[in-house]
């Protein structure tokens, strides 16, 4: 966190519609980058970040998970937590998420899947923001296979999760836009490409955008 702002990152965020295999894509992007540059410092994060946030708040991971899922506390739960001295407001959870996620993104060499990352890390110069999309029933079929759901349950899961992810991205924006398309450097249709091909495209875009920017700044240093 002590680095000058110009040296924050690099970070790649991957936002996704439900059922687009973002975790597998992120894993392959990290493997690509570590092999390409002969390093081991690139890593990817998704749910593991919840435990770090819970640690910061001195609360259980489920409290943070509920915020991400958009689950509001009932009045009874709030009363119980208040009497036990463990009440943590949504505002505190939101601030902790933003602080922890932003710190990790600034540290750099991170591929972050979801977690509102595109909103939180958008001002980092050395950042690449990708969105994965696919036709609705392509994603439903993928969810059915992965989660062993019937079509009705998969349809409901996709619609509900898509809505929660859209709301989460908006939560960390100062204004609530009707569309979030402008936040992304590129959108990739996962139904058109394999997981490895998608990862390769993202790696190439990293080369074009972030590596170029970093190289140009190095040339400016006397």
Image (cartoon, rainbow, N blue to C red):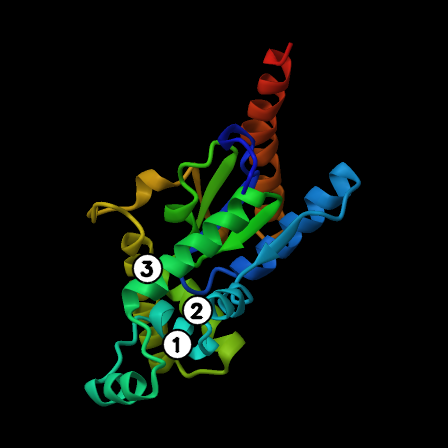
Picture quarter containing residue 70? bottom left
- For mark 2, does the 10 Å Cα neighbourhood hold few (<14), some (14 to 19), or many (20 or more) residues? some
Q: Residues within 10 Å of mark 3 (few under 14, many from 20)?
A: many
> Residue 122: x percent and y percent?
40, 40
Q: Residue furthest right?
A: 38
> What label sits on residue 57 in the rendered view?
2
**Rendered image: mark on residue 168:** 3
Residue 202 in picture, x, y percent from top left: 56, 41
Number of residue marks: 3
Q: Residues within 10 Å of mark 1 (few under 14, many from 20)?
A: many
Residue at mark 1? 63
Is there any visible trace of residue 116 in the rendered image?
A: no
Q: Earlier in the sequence, mark 2 or mark 3?
A: 2
State the separation of the CA atoms marked 1 and 2.
10 Å
Quarter of image, res 67: bottom left
* Labels 2 and 3 touching (C-beta < 8 A): no
């Amino acid at each position: 966190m002590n680095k000058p702002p110009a040296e924050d990152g690099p970070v790649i965020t991957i936002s996704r519609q439900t059922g687009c295999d973002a975790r597998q894509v992120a894993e392959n992007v990290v493997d690509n980058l570590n092999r390409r540059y002969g390093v081991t410092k690139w890593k990817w994060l998704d749910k593991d970040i919840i435990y770090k946030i819970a640690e910061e708040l001195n609360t259980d991971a489920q409290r943070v998970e509920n915020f991400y899922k958009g689950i509001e506390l009932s009045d009874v739960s709030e009363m119980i937590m208040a009497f036990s001295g463990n009440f943590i407001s949504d505002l505190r959870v939101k601030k902790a998420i933003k602080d922890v996620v932003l710190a990790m993104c600034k540290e750099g060499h991170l591929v972050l899947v979801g977690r509102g990352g595109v909103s939180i890390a958008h001002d980092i110069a050395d950042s690449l923001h990708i969105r994965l999309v696919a036709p609705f029933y392509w994603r439903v079929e993928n969810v059915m296979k992965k989660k062993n759901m019937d079509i009705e349950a998969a349809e409901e899961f996709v619609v509900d999760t898509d809505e929660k992810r859209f709301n989460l991205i908006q939560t960390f924006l100062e204004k609530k836009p009707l569309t979030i398309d402008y936040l992304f450097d590129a959108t990739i249709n996962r139904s058109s490409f394999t997981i490895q091909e998608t990862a390769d495209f993202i790696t190439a875009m990293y080369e074009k955008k972030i590596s170029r920017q970093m190289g140009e700044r190095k040339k400016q240093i006397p």
